[in-house]
Amino acid sequence: MAIDPSASVYTRLALRFYDFVVLTVSNLFAWRCPTGSKLLPFYQAHIGENAHLEIGVGTGYYPAASAARLAKVKLVTLLDLNPNTLAFAQRRLTRAGYKGDIEAVERSIFDPLPEEMRARYDSVALFYLFHCLPGAFPKKATDVFRNVVPALAPGGVVYGATILGKDVAHNWFGTRLMKLYNGKGIFGNTEDSEERLRQAMEETFEEYEVQVVGVVALFTGRKPRQVA
């Protein structure tokens, strides 16, 4: 099965440089949303109590950096389309000292989740996923939320972060990265705006929040609506 460019770019070699290129340089200078002071605290603040689902795992930086916070969580499920990222993230989380169960699920988020994952997770993280997906807000977000919501346990939260491409002020560096990544199919976010993300969240959740730091939208959604 062919893997979309947004996923296939994460080769074993590329994963070795991902944290520096994306989490250090790009987040600070292009997207203006620092990893250490903004994204990581936001990630850790919403980790659930019993089971956590990580969708679009990258290098596994966020769960590995949160191993102490995850100590009370019995299960972490990693879901991604790329087997390289799944293996890399699973090893990293284990080496960080996480003692609970780790599941790796190789799957597209545009496909419904397996039945055994229903009503299982207190927290579902979607970090830097949406801007890598083809399509545009609100539809692609609504499609993803429709597949994710059934996995939420009662009282659970869906949360994440995404780089916006529309109605935000990109600087010189960010503008050039946007053109490069969208041209190669690594990003698909030229029409993704805060307003359209809010529309998708309003359609899906009774309670939601969106805040923009730099050109990155940080979002949370709770109490899913009954969506057909």
Image: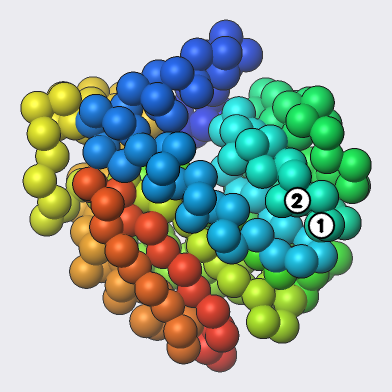
Q: Between residue 177 and residue 101, name the one nearer to us.
A: 101
Q: Residue at x 56, y 90 (%)?
A: 226
Q: Residue at x 52, y 88 (%)?
A: 225
Which x, y percent locates residue 17?
Answer: 50, 14
For label 2, count other residues whose C-alpha is less than 10 Å away and answer few (under 14), some (14-19) or many (20+): many
Q: Between residue 101 and residue 106, name the one nearer to us.
A: 101
In the image, what residue type sits under mark 2?
Answer: Leu
Which x, y percent locates residue 143?
Answer: 48, 66
**Residue at the spot of label 2:** 70
Which x, y percent locates residue 189?
Answer: 28, 46
Residue 173 drawn above or below residue 39: above
In which quarter of the view is residue 115 placed? bottom right
Q: Is residue 132 visible?
A: no
Q: Between residue 216 and residue 132, name the one nearer to us.
A: 216
In which quarter of the view is residue 96 placed? top right
For label 1, count other residues whose C-alpha is less than 10 Å away and answer few (under 14), some (14-19) or many (20+): many
**Residue at the spot of label 1:** 73
Q: Residue at x 16, y 25 (%)?
A: 173
Q: Between residue 202 and residue 74, name the one nearer to us.
A: 74
Please tell me the numbered disc located at residue 34: none
